[in-house]
Image (cartoon, helix red, strand yellow):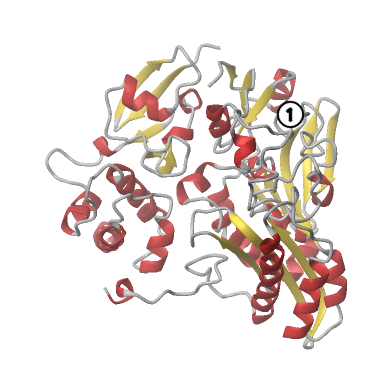
Amino acid sequence: MSPSISLTLNGAKRDVALDDPRVTLLDLLRERLALPGTKKGCDRGQCGACTVLVNGRRVNSCLTLAATLDGAEITTIEGLAAGDDLHPVQAAFIENDAFQCGYCTPGQIMSAVGLIAEDRAGEDLERIREGMSGNICRCAAYHGITLAVRQATRGSAGIKKDDAA
Amino acid sequence: MKRFEFIQPTSLDEALAAWEPGAAWLGGGTNLVDLMKTGAMQPVKVIDITRLPGLAEIETLAEGGVRIGALVRNSDLANDADIASRFPMVSEALLAGASGQLRNAATVGGNLMQRTRCAYFQDPQAACNRRDPGAGCDAREAGAGQAVLGWSEICIATNPSDFCVPLAALDAIVEVRGPDGAREIPMAEFHLLPGDTPERETALSPGELIVALRLPPEAEGFAANARYLKVRDRTSYAFAMTSAAAALRIENGRIAEARLALGAVAATPWRVTEAEALLAGQTPDAALFARAAEAALAGATPSGDNAWKIDLARRTAIRALEMAAAGTPAQMPALPASPFGSTAGDLAHA
């Protein structure tokens, strides 16, 4: 079987011919589709730097074979902002000083977007820390990250309420 | 990573027919793809089973109990409200494992097939009898986290699964399909101790595939007093050093029936029926739990520099029994399966 896949990538349809089934989603994004925002840290599912959304759910793109993704909807850090308008989680990371070197930040932000969509941690700081434990920050910016996720969670609760009204 | 043939069957029969020696089933890929990268696993063919129909459902059974499809994702099972209320320690164990990202990918069937996290198994440069029969074992002099129960001279690896520990305690049944049809394997017989053949890790025959697992009706009787406890190097996103699933059915202040299984101490989840027998009919108290934990670890011996693990496992069992006796919490704890509650600190006041 020729592993050729069709994706919706950050809202745009993409047909991708794969010459090798070994390609992970992470390498596909970075090396073949010119989307280097998603970062390679450990490449073994231990650090979370490669987190993206697949069909709305956060996963480690380093452990996902691209060949398995025909028909999937992928969102990466490049797909979050609307033009110059940052996504609320991106804005909250800046406001809360939630990074130093920035290498883990795209994965942190995508994981936070996934966590907020899961709607299980709420504004409880301990639940946010537990929910974000799959993202390691070598600079230990965890304090700011936790506050940023809480702030963005508050914002999204407001948005949901407005939508319902 | 070695090259492999990739196929994506759309029916169970097609998948079973595609199997050949050296092939691997691909579910969430969180363990398989990782081990393919290190070279510890080198399948010639990867059969992606995630497009098979009907294997991702959670069904309540008419006779009681539940049937869980092999492709249900860990996060979906853990967060299923019905599972959390009827089999709370199953949810707690799942949420104690890995991370949000990994739980979104990992499957129920794949969790049962998880390979050991022994670093010498994962690294093809190291000698490992489990990966390469007859090669020797580099873990013998180096591994602090290795088995203290059921190990053999040629393999001291442990099973890393959290999920499998409550499954063992609750007498889960594994439903399998293969070239010779369908069969069922009790959880107690599913994983194998190493003995002289550590490369044989499960009771599955070549070409067999897990399609579902069932929790029997009796397993629901423990819902009010069931906990999973996991001790690890850091509070979250780490494999267990020791763990325990403890469940009590308490009637009129006495333990009518008890279930106890230990994790990360052996190559299989470690059910301790001797301890369960000792608990049955008794009034729950600290002295009783200490006796039960003593019985649970009675056969334990260090496999290297890990005598500490025997004591840690004993204390983990005692604490899990105490937590179970105190009652299943109404809401999943913020830190599932953790010995720590809310932690004080600046963030709590932020």
The vertical placement of A19 against B334, above or below, is above
Point out residue B294 in the picture as x, y percentages from the top left corner.
79, 72
Q: Is residue B70 at least partly visible in the picture?
A: no
Point out residue B200 in the picture as x, y percentages from the top left corner.
79, 35
| Kind of element beneath mark 1 | loop
Tally the marks. Answer: 1
Residue B176 sits in quarter: top right
Q: Is residue B24 left or right of residue A126?
A: right
Q: Is residue A125 left or right of residue B282?
A: left
Point out residue A160 in the picture as x, y percentages from the top left corner.
29, 58
Q: What amino acid is labelled 1 in the image? A: Ala
Q: Is residue A36 at least partly visible in the picture?
A: yes
The vertical placement of B100 against A63, above or below, is below
Locate the C terminus of chain B and report the quarter of the image it occupies. bottom left
For disc 1, the chain is B
Which residue corresponds to the image point at 86% horizontal and 75% vertical from the top-left? B278
Residue A78 sits in quarter: top left
Q: Is residue B184 left or right of residue B222?
A: right
| Residue located beneath label 1 in the image | B135
Which residue corresponds to the image point at 34% horizontal and 75% vertical from the top-left? B345
